[in-house]
């Protein structure tokens, strides 16, 4: 099992950051790597169990199922059902925690998955930097401009 | 109704540095301005779950708190108040650190729940939130900025303290009674004599260790004989390695706490004793699965085996079936090299001095064992197997010509020791005859940096854990019996590793 963990500090209150990321269908609005997104079967995007179907800017199609959503813990857990990355049993968690000192947000994004031997480093880099950190960087830029 | 207080911040330091301070349950008087004095009751360790710390606060209050959880994996510490002169009831607090990977900083979360007498809820919530937690954030930030943790990693540093962190010097910074073994005059084993000697307080950068097991190596014998006078003068204490636990730390030491289980090897002799100060740079923490005796038996010899098989024999990158010839194959280093080289794909040939040792070497992975008589004849037998691509030579002078004859073309001769006498000059034209390379390594050059020491040690414990290496037979002697241990090692009466128990 490979584990990727990325964390950052975003200069906005956790409530505010959460309102931007809690919508399971909103990746294209805030993540620069995502081109489009829809929820399959016209389900609401905050229904636990719903599936988002989206494309990366490189054209890869990914389907992910929402496994847990907590407005109390500011936590969203999802799994990959289908993707071109070559990962198996991929479960990711995006979690926000308020930093009382300065009204900022501690953001954590982690994933566990399995992959073919020898691809661990490449996928850790792609997911940790290309997806998670890129998303945090976009959030930091967005909230710095306010 | 239970009150709940949560405060969190980001500290601009790596999590390892912040955690090193926070995990010490007895550190608050060094960095938190509200705490005047802190001590752990009943002489227990400050990282012992269940221990109780006794705070005297600047405002005159007293608090006793018990450590309930210490989690080095999640960087979490949970504790509760067992008795206090402030009316905090059923108070349970948790400190959690998390790494901010974006910038290598630390997220610090501090929360608690407690009850109060009626009407005091808000006042006490405020006191805990700002007076303890937020003030603590600021105090620790300043403590780290001023390098307080670097100066006072140990409890006994006598230097200047961070503001607001006064603490009376502890009596432990005194010399501790010890016994040590000295080489009275260069010569035989009978020159090893035990005597009383105090071990002084650790100096800057040093850690004082209560040693429990001391590894005996052939280099100790060379020192006793006076072969390496630059390393050990007459009257000096031999010994390059030991395992035990931390008594206390000098100024500038961080990463080690009183009671930590540690082991070391170092290029300066002196380990044949009960209590010793060594530079913190030499020390490694011992995993719970590795006992003191095992560490003393394995550290120097295992790290030697590590660089021999990985760096000098270049396993497993050489062709499978590389023939490795190991002299003293049933010795402390020999057994480890046999097992490790075999695991990495080599064909292992060993020489030993008895049938019993031959059996032991075979059990540890040596495929072809040659029992040597007094003449040290083995070259023909080795050549029948194709010659030695790598030769691990602990024999020295008496086997010189046989070694040259046993080596294969482009073979590598590693001169590791001189059990039969110092190797006289090697004729380079003899090397030229078969393009032989020659090296004369010493383990300390292969663990000269902290990173390398830790990398090799981790590889050693991993090899032990996964069964690649087995703990060799350990022959135990008391510290006072060091002479007997040397005598048996010299007359090749031992197999496996020899350890002195302190």
Image: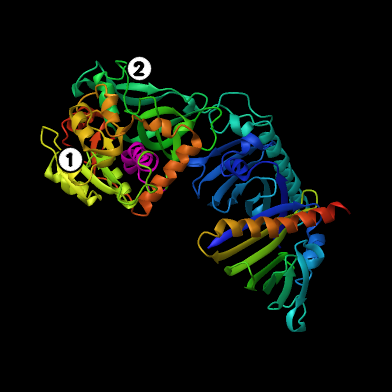
Q: Secondary structure at mark 2?
A: loop
Q: Are dots 2 and 1 in contact, CB under 8 Å?
A: no
Measured as percent of width and height from the top left, residue B155 is found at: 54, 32
Judged from this view, the residue extending furthest toward the right is A146
Q: Nearer the viewer, residue B36 or B147?
A: B147
> Magenta residues, as a range?
B288-311
Q: Determine if marks 2 and 1 fall on one subunit.
A: yes
Question: In what quadrant of the picture does the C terminus of chain A appear?
Answer: bottom right
Q: Quadrant of residue B267?
A: top left
Q: Residue at x 19, y 30 (%)?
A: B401
Mark number displayed over residue B352 = 1
Mark 2 neighbour density, 10 Å: few (under 14) some (14–19) many (20 or more): few
Q: Residue at x 78, y 61 (%)?
A: A32
Q: Secondary structure at mark 1?
A: strand
Measured as percent of width and height from the top left, residue B344 is found at: 35, 50
Q: Nearer the viewer, residue B469 or B395?
A: B395
The chief SS type of the magenta part is: helix
Judged from this view, the residue extending furthest toward the front is B433
Mark 1 neighbour density, 10 Å: few (under 14) some (14–19) many (20 or more): many
Q: Which residue is mark 2?
A: B230
């Amino acid at each position: 099992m490979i584990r990727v963990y990325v964390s950052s500090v975003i200069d906005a209150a956790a409530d505010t950051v959460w309102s931007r990321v809690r919508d399971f269908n909103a990746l294209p609005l805030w993540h620069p790597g995502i081109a489009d997104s829809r929820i399959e079967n016209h389900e609401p995007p905050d229904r636990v169990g719903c599936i988002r179907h989206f494309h990366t800017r490189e054209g890869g199609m990914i389907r992910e199922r929402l496994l847990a959503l907590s407005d109390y813990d500011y936590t969203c857990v999802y799994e990959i059902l289908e993707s071109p990355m070559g990962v198996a049993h991929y479960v990711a968690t995006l979690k926000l925690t308020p930093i009382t000192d300065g009204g900022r947000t501690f953001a954590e994004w982690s994933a566990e998955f399995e992959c073919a031997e020898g691809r661990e480093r490449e996928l850790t880099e792609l997911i940790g930097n290309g997806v998670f950190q890129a998303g945090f960087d976009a959030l930091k830029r967005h909230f710095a401009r306010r | 109704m239970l009150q709940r207080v949560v405060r969190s911040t980001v500290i601009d330091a790596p999590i390892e540095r912040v955690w090193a301070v926070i995990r010490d349950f007895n550190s608050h008087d060094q960095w938190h301005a509200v705490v005047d004095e802190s001590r752990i009751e009943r002489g227990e360790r400050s990282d012992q779950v269940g221990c109780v710390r006794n705070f005297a606060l600047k405002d005159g209050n007293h608090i006793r708190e018990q450590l309930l959880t210490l989690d080095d994996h999640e960087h979490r510490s949970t504790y509760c108040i067992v008795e206090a002169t402030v009316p905090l009831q059923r108070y349970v607090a948790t400190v959690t650190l998390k790494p901010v990977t974006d910038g290598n900083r630390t997220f610090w979360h501090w929360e608690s729940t407690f009850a109060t007498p009626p009407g005091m809820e808000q006042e006490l919530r405020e006191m805990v939130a700002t007076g303890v937690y937020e003030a603590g954030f600021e105090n620790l930030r300043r403590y780290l900025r001023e390098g307080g943790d670097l100066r006072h990693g140990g409890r006994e540093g006598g230097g200047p303290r961070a503001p607001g962190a006064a603490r009376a010097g502890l009596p432990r910074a005194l010399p501790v009674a010890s016994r040590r073994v000295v080489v009275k005059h260069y010569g035989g084993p009978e020159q090893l004599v035990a005597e009383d000697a105090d071990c002084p307080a650790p100096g800057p950068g040093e850690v004082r260790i209560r040693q429990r097991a001391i590894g005996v190596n052939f280099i100790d014998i060379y020192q006793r004989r006076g072969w390496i006078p630059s390393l050990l003068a007459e009257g000096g204490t031999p010994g390059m390695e030991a395992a035990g636990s931390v008594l206390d730390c000098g100024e500038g030491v961080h990463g080690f706490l009183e009671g930590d289980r540690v082991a070391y090897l170092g290029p300066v002799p002196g380990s044949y004793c009960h209590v010793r100060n060594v530079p913190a740079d030499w020390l490694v923490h011992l995993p719970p699965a590795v006992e003191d005796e095992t560490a003393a038996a394995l550290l120097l010899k295992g790290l030697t085996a590590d660089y021999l098989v990985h760096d000098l024999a270049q396993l497993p990158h050489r062709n499978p079936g590389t023939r490795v010839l190991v002299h003293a194959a049933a010795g402390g280093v020999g057994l480890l090299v046999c097992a490790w080289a075999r695991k990495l794909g080599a064909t292992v040939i060993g020489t030993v001095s008895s049938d019993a040792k031959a059996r032991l070497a075979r059990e540890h992975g040596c495929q072809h064992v040659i029992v040597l008589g007094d003449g040290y004849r083995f070259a023909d037998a080795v050549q029948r197997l194709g010659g030695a691509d790598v030769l691990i030579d602990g024999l020295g002078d008496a086997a010189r010509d046989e070694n040259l004859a046993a080596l294969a073309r482009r073979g590598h001769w590693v001169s590791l020791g001189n059990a039969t006498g110092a190797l006289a000059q090697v004729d380079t034209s003899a090397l030229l005859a078969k393009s032989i390379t020659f090296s004369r390594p010493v383990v300390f050059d292969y663990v000269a940096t902290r990173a390398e020491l830790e990398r090799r040690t981790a590889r050693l414990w991993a090899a032990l854990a996964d069964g690649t290496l087995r703990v060799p037979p350990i022959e135990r002697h008391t510290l006072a019996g060091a002479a007997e241990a040397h005598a048996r090692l010299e007359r090749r009466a031992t197999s496996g590793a020899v350890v002195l128990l302190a």
